[in-house]
Structure formats: structure tokens, C-alpha cells
């Protein structure tokens, strides 16, 4: 905890974590606005379920982008610590070209087979129909979103974070305004319902792409990543990205698939009353708000730890920095959990759930998911910062991937499926099963970090040709 006495530590953590938290908050408000406005439209509960499930492939793309950018961060943060900007530009180029390919494949899939995609998540004809309408429009956003989102995340590794706030703020204003116009038919526009929401989101994503491209390729003076750098390639760096990035990418995609599979399980629960999909959509949205600061700290940890290793800090200095960051995230997690749990009876049950037309059994399911999620925030805070921040920044990508994936696939998913679909247990047991992974993940992460064998300098010697 000695690092807490260092003003540079506090200043550096806040300088990175705060803009990222603001970006996450703006993204949350965009999602919340979509949810509120669709919930208020005619047939709101069906539209909420349809948009929630239709966004699952987009969620997978988002996580793939996070995985690609995480792969870049493992290397770029350490090269940035060495002030080797040429290597950072080559790393960005390789990763961005890969994510463009993935974005095209997923975009074509949802555009060409929207009904088939929806049937993976639900059996409801009405939800499938509305969700397919949504995908036929939003699918075009896949082609630009992968590039812009990955680039924004990559820039964090070299402490370029303020532009992400500008990008997301512009997206927020555009999305909310067009939602109001197109969902409800204001200002003389037709009332398009879920199609209007899709058009609004597509427009916002295209604007994000334009802003980040103009900034990076024409304005930025620190990294100086220009359009011609997209043609850059280095075989040795490509092998390092594959070596250290593949476990990160597999980790994020496996995590995203597990979250989607949880949505599939909830979508096939048959209660006499209530809509588990709509309840899960609202509960997840609320939980994201509670973890915004946590993800900011985790991203700050990845940059700070990687940079420290690249700068040649001693083994003990890196350990001290990592332990301090983990203690900070635990304390923040405890505070967030206390506040969130207190708001359940004061705000969410009497105001938020009725606002989204969640009543009776559906409201009970949302309450169960929210309460168990809030209670697990400190555990999630520690594991998120440990895996995506500390261990990855130290180049310990294989172990961090195993620590993140195994509890989810071997414990949480099977347990949730058995309790929900086989035992037909109450929603509280289902919600508890969803959070079971964190009980196993935290002690495993603690043991790995305490051993100190995760610190590796993954950069190449200076003087090699690029």
C-alpha cells in the first residue's frame, strides 16, 4: 500500500480511470435511453426482449473488440513504457486489420440470417420478428464499430483517453435525440418503434467512426498513427501478438459466449408468469452502472502495470503497485455494493421497475438478479482488476485466461442450467447460480498474484528492424 503515499500514483490512476469511467457512464446512459424509450413504446415488453436478445451478437462483437484491444494492450503498454512508439503503431495496425475481418463476418451473418440468429436465443415468434427487424438495420453498424471501438480501447494503453469521452458524448446526444424522433414519431417523422431505435444506434455508431478516425489520423500528435500505418506489418511482432493476444481474445470471446448462453438459459425458462429476458435486460443495465468505476480502475491498472514493467521498474515495485491497485478496487467495490443494495427498496423496486413496466413475477426476477449481482460487486471488482488489469499487463495471459474462463464454464453455467431448466427452482436460486463463478475466481486470482510469478517483460530488444 506504499504507492498510496505517492501523489503520482493517485494522479496517474485518476487521470486514466476517470475518463474511462466517464466513457462507460455515457455508454450506459445510451443503453439506458434505448431501454427506457423502447419500454415506453407500444408493446414495450416485447420490444425490450427483442432488442436485448438481438444485441447479443453485437455484445459478442464488442467483447471480441475488447479481446483484440486487450491483446494489443499486453504489448503496447510495455512498449509505451519504453517510449517505443514505432512498435506501438505496428501493433495497432495488425490488431485493427484482424478486427475488421471479424466485424465483416459477423455483420454479414446478422444481415443475411437475422431470423436464424434470433432463434438461437428465443422461441417466441413475436420476439423473433421484432428482433429480426432490428438486426436488418443495425447489422450495418458492425462494419465500422469493430474498428472504432477497438481503436478507442487500444489508445487507452498509451494514455490517450480523453477522446473516448468526446466520441461517446457525441454518440449519446445523437442516439437519444434520434430515438425520441424515430421511436415515437416526433418532429413529423414516422413512429418506427424498434426500427427507429436501430436507425438511431446505427447513426450514432457511424458518427463515432468518423470522429475517432479524424482525431487519430489527422489531429493526434502523441502517437502519430496515420492512415499509411495501417499497411505496417512486422512478422516478429505479429507472432508476439498471436502468442500473448490469442489467450486474451479466446478469454473475452469465451466470456461473451457464456454471457450469451446465460441469456439463452433465461430465455427458455418457463414461469407461469413473468418475462426472465426482460428482467435480465433491466438487471444487467443497472449492474453495469454499479461497475463503471471498477472497469475504469481495471483499465488504469493494465496501463500502469504494463508501463511500469516497460520502464524497467523492479519486481517489488511492480508487486507493490499491483497490490495497491487491487486494494483500491476492493474498497471501491464494497462502497458501490453498499449503495446499490440500499437503493433496491428505495429506488429500483418502487420507481425503476415500474418505469420499465416490470411488475409481479417479472419484477421479482429482476430484483433477484439485481440483488445477487450487487452483493457480488466486491468479488467482481477484485477479479476484473486482477485478470484484465494486473495479470494481463504482466504478460501472464495463459493463466489469467484460465482463471477467468474455468469458473464460468465449469461452475456457473452448468449450475445455472441445472437449477433453472432441470430443477425449475425459484428465481433467487437461479440468480445466485449466475454469480457463483466469483466465489471460486477470487481466491485463485489472489493466490496467483501473491506468488509473483506473473511479471514478464514481453517486449523485443531495442534496435531490431520494423
Image (cartoon, helix red, strand yellow):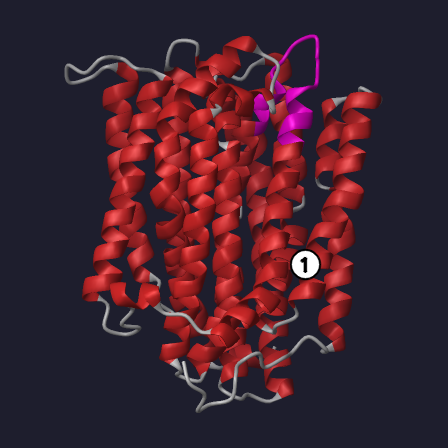
Q: Is residue 272 magenta?
A: yes
- Looking at the rendering, which quadrant does residue 152 occupy? bottom left
Q: Is residue 224 magenta?
A: no
In this view, the residue in front, 323 or 106, is: 106
Vertical placement of 52 versus 156: above or below?
A: above
- Residue bearing the label numbered 1: 401
Residue 300 x %, y %: 48, 66
- Residue bounds of the magenta highlight: 262-280
Name the residue: 58% across, 77% down. Answer: 321
What is the quadrant of the N terminus in the image?
Answer: bottom right
Measured along the vertical axis of the image, is residue 154 above or below residue 39? Answer: below
Q: Is residue 273 left or right of residue 98?
A: right
Q: Residue at x 49, y 18 (%)?
A: 354
Relative placement, left or right, of 87 versus 207 is: right
Q: Nearer the viewer, residue 136 or 422?
A: 136
Residue at (44%, 74%) from the top-left corner? 234
Amino acid at each position: 500500500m506504499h504507492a498510496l503515499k505517492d501523489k503520482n500514483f493517485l494522479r496517474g490512476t485518476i487521470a486514466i480511470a476517470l475518463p474511462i469511467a466517464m466513457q462507460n457512464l455515457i455508454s450506459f446512459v445510451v443503453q439506458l435511453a434505448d431501454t427506457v424509450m423502447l419500454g415506453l413504446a407500444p408493446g414495450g415488453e416485447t420490444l425490450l426482449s427483442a432488442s436485448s436478445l438481438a444485441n447479443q451478437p453485437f455484445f459478442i462483437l464488442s467483447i471480441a473488440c475488447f479481446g483484440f484491444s486487450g491483446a494489443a494492450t499486453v504489448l503496447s503498454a510495455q512498449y509505451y513504457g519504453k517510449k517505443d512508439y514505432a512498435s506501438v503503431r505496428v501493433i495497432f495496425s495488425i490488431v485493427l486489420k484482424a478486427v475488421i475481418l471479424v466485424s465483416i463476418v459477423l455483420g454479414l451473418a446478422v444481415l443475411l440470417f437475422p431470423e436464424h440468429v434470433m432463434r438461437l436465443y428465443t422461441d417466441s415468434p413475436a420476439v423473433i420478428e421484432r428482433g429480426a427487424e432490428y438486426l436488418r438495420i443495425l447489422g450495418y453498424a458492425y462494419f465500422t464499430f469493430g474498428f472504432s471501438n477497438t481503436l478507442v480501447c487500444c489508445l487507452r494503453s498509451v494514455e490517450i483517453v480523453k477522446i473516448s469521452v468526446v466520441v461517446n458524448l457525441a454518440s449519446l446526444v445523437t442516439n437519444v435525440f434520434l430515438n425520441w424522433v424515430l421511436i415515437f414519431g416526433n418532429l413529423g417523422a414516422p413512429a418506427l418503434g424498434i426500427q427507429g431505435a436501430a436507425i438511431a444506434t446505427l447513426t450514432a455508431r457511424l458518427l463515432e467512426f468518423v470522429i475517432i478516425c479524424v482525431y487519430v489520423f489527422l489531429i493526434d500528435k502523441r502517437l502519430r498513427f496515420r492512415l499509411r500505418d495501417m499497411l505496417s506489418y512486422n512478422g516478429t511482432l505479429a507472432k508476439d501478438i498471436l502468442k500473448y493476444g490469442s489467450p486474451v481474445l479466446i478469454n473475452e470471446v469465451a466470456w461473451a459466449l457464456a454471457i450469451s448462453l446465460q441469456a439463452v438459459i433465461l430465455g427458455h425458462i418457463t414461469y407461469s408468469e413473468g418475462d426472465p429476458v426482460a428482467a435480465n435486460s433491466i438487471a444487467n443495465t443497472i449492474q453495469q452502472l454499479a461497475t463503471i468505476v471498477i472497469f475504469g480502475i481495471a483499465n488504469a491498472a493494465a496501463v500502469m502495470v504494463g508501463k511500469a514493467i516497460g520502464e524497467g521498474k523492479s519486481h517489488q515495485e511492480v508487486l507493490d503497485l499491483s497490490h495497491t491497485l487491487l486494494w483500491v478496487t476492493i474498497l471501491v467495490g464494497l462502497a458501490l455494493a453498499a449503495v446499490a443494495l440500499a437503493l433496491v427498496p428505495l429506488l429500483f423496486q418502487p420507481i425503476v421497475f415500474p418505469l420499465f413496466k416490470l411488475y409481479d413475477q417479472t419484477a421479482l426476477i429482476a430484483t433477484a438478479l439485481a440483488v445477487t449481482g450487487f452483493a457480488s460487486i466486491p468479488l467482481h471488482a477484485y477479479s476484473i482488476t486482477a485478470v484484465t488489469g494486473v495479470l494481463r499487463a504482466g504478460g501472464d495471459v495463459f493463466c489469467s485466461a484460465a482463471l477467468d474462463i474455468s469458473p464460468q464454464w465449469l461452475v456457473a453455467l452448468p449450475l445455472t442450467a441445472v437449477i433453472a431448466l432441470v430443477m425449475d427452482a425459484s428465481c433467487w436460486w437461479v440468480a445466485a447460480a449466475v454469480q457463483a463463478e466469483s466465489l471460486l475466481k477470487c481466491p485463485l486470482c489472489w493466490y496467483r498474484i501473491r506468488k509473483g510469478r506473473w511479471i514478464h517483460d514481453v517486449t523485443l530488444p531495442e534496435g531490431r528492424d520494423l
